[in-house]
Amino acid sequence: MSKICRIISTKPQKTSNFFVGFVDIIYLCIEKKRKYNNTEDMKRSLIIMALAVISLTVSAQKKWTLKDCIDYALQNNISLKQARLNKQSATEERKLSQAALLPSLTASTNQSVGYRPWQSSGMTTVSNGTVNNKVTKTYYNGTYGINASWTVWNGNKNRNQVKLSKVSEQQAELSAEETSNNIQEEIAKLYVQILYLSETIDVNKQSLEASKKNEERGRQMVEVGKMSKADLAQLTAQRANGEYDVVAAETQLADYKLRLKQLLEITDSEDFDIADPKASDQQALAAIPSMTSVYEAAVAKRPEIKNAELSLQSSNLQLKIAKAGYMPTLSLTGGVGTSTSSNNTNDWDKQIKTNFDASAGLGVSIPIYDQRKARTAVNKAKLQHEQALLDIQNEQKELYATVEGFWLEALSNQQKFRAAISSVESQQESYDLLTEQFNLGLKNIVELMNGKTNLLKAQQNRLQSKYLTILNQQLLRFYQGETLNI
């Protein structure tokens, strides 16, 4: 232990972001050791240091699972937040329409000042035997009132408006759910693409190592005169192409990670990496749900279908509201009021009492000619109803096409994957045999390069078909109502 302490007793000046905390903890523990004479105190200090280092390591090596990505996006994605705000706005509209069923009550007052510059006669008073004639050119008036009104019946327009606002609220909620589903699908596609590219990089690196070995073997054969420099140049070119493939795949991987970060609304500069579950072959070979069962479940659960059905319900309510334009409107009104004036000789409170007035009324409004407004509204509502019927059919058709596309992709790629497994095995055996024969001088450079190219192509086909199968299987289950999980 004393040897370790001597090695790191001098605190380094420059460290990486992760090791700054690590070195600081060790340095602090060394300082503590110099003060401790007790072995037990030193043990406790080392335990604390170990726990702190483990905590730093875990935080520095965070890997995002698919569930982590989806949960984070559902909380932070801007498009989804906007959809939720639209739902809240629809809720406020629904509350407003419900409040319109109740009477309205208003209080009002008006205070005014008047001026009569050419008034010559005024108020005459007698006080203590003296006659006073007061001419008041400026006067004050005040009115006070409380008024109420209530629409008793307007062809059920207000009640149907409440029902329509409830439907609009449900549609806004379904739109938010639809946005959520779209985000989850996009995350799954990016996540699987990242997994595919990660394994592609590993395959390309293995291929590159094989190219380097072939190139090195070629140099040895050139030295002993068993190979021309032209053939060696071909091996060198193949090795360079392998390096290019690795860099290209790494660039693609970085691009897809960036796109996933943007979808998650992660804007900091911290490193971002996903967990690599190494999807197994058994996942790709799992049974594919039947297209009919997926479609039937999707029709019953998908928000876009429910939204289209609500649009049809909305059009029916809009038609009823439009027809209310032909109906009379019945309303109740009432109010109380009073007034005061400085020209009145009575006191203010007596004026309030004397001028008090109350009224109530029943009003009926019958439309006779409204410049064709009601008829136009009814005709447009009927057209909207027809459009809603077509929208349902279109949504069902698009959903069927989407499900069928996922199912066909899953089925065809699963078949390709089965064939690719055998192809990789045979190409690997063929390449291994070609390598041995090449080393013995029994095969030429062209045959070796072709064998390696065929092996790499078979490996890439295997990976591509594998991850496309897994992705489409997951999307089919997602449309059945299951959670995305890879």
Image (cartoon, rainbow, N blue to C red):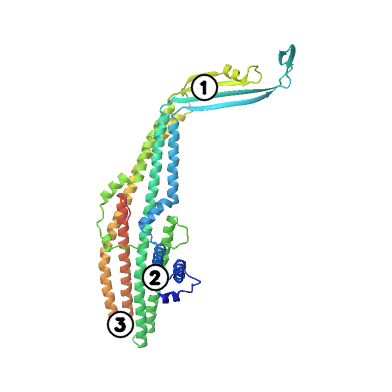
Mark 1 falls on what kind of element? strand
Disc number at residue 439? Answer: 3
Report, in whole angstroms, how far the alpha carbon at label 3 lies from the one at label 1. 109 Å
Tell me if 151 is positioned left or right of 294 in this view. right
Q: Earlier in the sequence, mark 2 or mark 3?
A: 2
The amino acid on which the numbered mark 2 sits, given as a three-letter code, is Thr
Report, in whole angstroms, how far the alpha carbon at label 2 lies from the one at label 3. 63 Å
Q: Is residue 217 above or below residue 344?
A: below
Disc number at residue 39? Answer: 2
- Closer to the camera, 388 or 143? 143
Q: Is residue 404 above or below residue 269?
A: above
Residue at the disc numbered 1: 335
Q: Earlier in the sequence, mark 3 or mark 1?
A: 1
Q: Is residue 147 above or below residue 129?
A: below
Q: Tag 2: Cα neighbours inside 10 Å, few (<14), some, or many (≥20)?
A: few
The amino acid on which the numbered mark 3 sits, given as a three-letter code, is Asn
Tell me if 404 is positioned left or right of 153 in this view. left
Question: Which residue is rendered at x = 32% and y = 74% of the image?
Answer: 452
The amino acid on which the numbered mark 1 sits, given as a three-letter code, is Gly
Quadrant position of the N terminus in the picture: bottom left
Q: Tag 1: Cα neighbours inside 10 Å, few (<14), some, or many (≥20)?
A: some
